[in-house]
Structures are given as structure tokens and as C-alpha cells.
Image (cartoon, grey):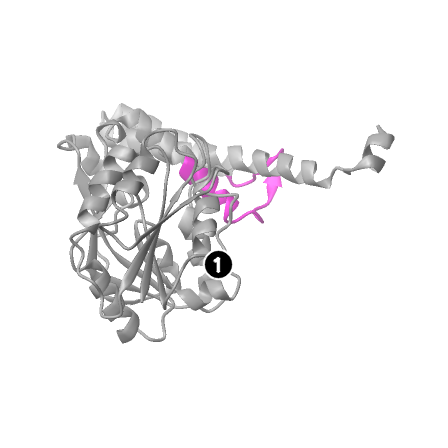
Amino acid sequence: MLTVLLATRNRSGILRSVLESYCLLQSPLNGWKLVVVDNGSTDDTPGVLASFRNRLPLTSLSEPTLGKNCALNTGLEFVDGDLAVFADDDAFPNPDWLVRLEEAAEKYSACSMFGGKIVPRWEAPPPPWIGWLELGPIFTVTPPTLREGELPSEMVPNIYGPNMAIRADVFRSGIRFDTSIGPRGSSYPMGSETELLVRLSRQGHRACHVQSAIVEHFVRKEQMDKTWVLQRAIRLGRGRFRMSPHVKLWMGVPRHLFRDIPRELSSMALAALSFREDAVFLSRWRLNILRGKAVEARTMTREQRAAALPTGPDAREQH
């Protein structure tokens, strides 16, 4: 049996369309269930979920604490079967999606982590400048160069949350998502699922790519905007730092930034002199990643200082 788990917040319109696509899914050999965790929605999400209870093997839950990983951890308590399949509330699966994941779990018996193919579903035709970008970290789609089979450890981050599966026994051992990372509001460090995958890889778990298990990830019109993309770079940089917090700091920021930022500024100036708009934008993208690392370094320093402060009645007496 497979359990599909997804978290949702205030996306009732797209969620309805996604659940309609779930109604077309072919059932895997050993059956499946769907667990949806409402992460404090204030729109019609509860009504949408209620309307599908007689059409899908659906369990709906509520997790008021804001944060995608908080919601996923709540849903993990309701996982049944051998495989936990993770999806997003804006990812549309092919009808044979679950069948292909089940087949892969049987075929690649030495693997604990599985990532399927994710392609974009554009809400509007993408502008030409989208071709300048590496789409994976921006729109959460898999690289076209990925091929079926086991992945080396350095390729594990190419498994993305809208289409991944992990053997349920991993979670029965007590493993959970890190709630300090991932979507929670408009400002956060990216890497909700990546942190978990990298952690599991370091523990010896193996991963594979399942080319035939396909979902389409919805790309909204407002995401095809340069300002949005550059803000995404900051969140990406924040997540990268949080997943490697042992980087040496100077003046509260990673030391390598004092080398990398001037180098990137020089590259951007040369690109501007050559009237290379694409190269200028990519330099701005990389600079914002570096900026995000600095932001997260300072955020984590504040968190560590706050955690070190004494608490309770004795602490109040000291003040």
C-alpha cells in the first residue's frame, strides 16, 4: 500500500483541480490512500477537501502551526503501508504515477528514496528570458539530463518535493522533517525536503530517479517575473546556508562571501559593458544567493543566542 501525503494552505482553487486529477489515478496493486494536511487555511480549503471525501481514499487533517514541514510531520503519523509518497498541492500527476512508483520501489529494493520526473505546467507562455535560467531550483522541475536508475549521493538534491517517495520504515524509525526550514509565510529558507534527503543520504540511504513517474508542477504567471525569481534566489541562499551551518564566519557572515561577492560584482560589470542582459541577470541571481547566505547566517546566530539565554523563574530573578 502507498500513502500519498501533501500539505496545503490557502490554495483551494488549484487544490480542487489537483484533486480532480487524483480521481483519475490508476490504483497501484496494493492500494493507496491520500492524506492532506491543511496548514491553517483561511479560504475554502476545508470545503474543497470535504467535497472529495466520497471520491478519493482521503484523510484530511489540520495543523495550525505555520510551516510546511510542521504539516508534513503531522501527516506522517497517518502513513500506512510500505511507501510514503510526497506531492504538492499544485502538482498534477499522470494517471499511472503511483503504479510507476510502486514498481520502482520493488525494482530498486536497495533504495529508500525515490524521485520522479517533474515537468512544468505553465499558466501562461513563458517569456524568452526564462531560457537563461536553471529551472530546477526556481520552478521545482527535474533536470532533463536525469536518467532512470540509482543516483550518486551528490545528485540526491535533484529529488524534489512535488514528486518523491520514501520507504515508510524510515519514518517509523523516528525520522522527521526539520521544521526550521521550508515554506512558512513569505520569508523562509528553502529546502523543505532537500534537507531530509541529504540527511538520509549521509546516513547511508540510497536514492534513485524514476523517469516514468511523472507530475506536472504548476508555474503561476506571477512567478514568471524577474523580481520574483530574484527573491527566490535569496530563499535558496538561506536554505543552502542552513543546510551547511559549519561554514566559517567573519563579522557574522560566511567568510567566503568577502571573496565571492566582489568577484560576482566584477563579472556583472563586465557583462554590463558587453551589453549581455542574460549574464547580468544571472550575476544578480548568484549575488542574491550570496545575500541569502548572509541573511541566514545572522538569523541563525540570533537563534543560537536566544536559545542560550536562561529561562524560567531563576532567569527572571537575574534580571
Residue 232 shows in the view:
yes
Residue 158 shows in the view:
no
**Residue under the point 26% across and 75% down:** 107
Residue 60 or 67: which is nearer the viewer?
A: 60
The kind of residue tagged 1 is Arg
- Dot 1, how many residues are within 10 Å of its Cα: few (below 14), some (14-19), or many (20+)? some
Q: In this picture, is 155 found above or below 46?
A: below
Extent of the magenta region: 235-256
User: Given the current orientation, which residue lies at the most extreme front position?
Assistant: 54
Residue 242 or 274: which is nearer the viewer?
A: 242
Q: In the image, 2: left or right of 19?
A: right
The residue at which mark 1 appears reads as 199
**Residue under the point 78% across and 37% down:** 312
Counting from the top left corner in percent of width and height, residue 13 is at 24, 33
Counting from the top left corner in percent of width and height, residue 157 is at 37, 54
Asked whether 148 falls inside the magenta stretch, the response is no
The quadrant in which the N terminus is found is: bottom left
Counting from the top left corner in percent of width and height, residue 243 is at 50, 48
Label 1 element class: helix
Q: In this picture, is 149 found above or below 313?
A: below
Q: Quadrant of residue 197?
A: bottom left
**Residue under the point 31% across and 63% down:** 2
Residue 158 or 82: which is nearer the viewer?
A: 82
Q: In the image, 268: left or right of 179?
A: left
Residue 89 or 210: which is nearer the viewer?
A: 89
**Residue under the point 42% across and 33% down:** 234
Asked whether 242 falls inside the magenta stretch, the response is yes
The quadrant in which the C terminus is found is: top right
Q: Quadrant of residue 97?
A: bottom left
Counting from the top left corner in percent of width and height, residue 36 is at 35, 47
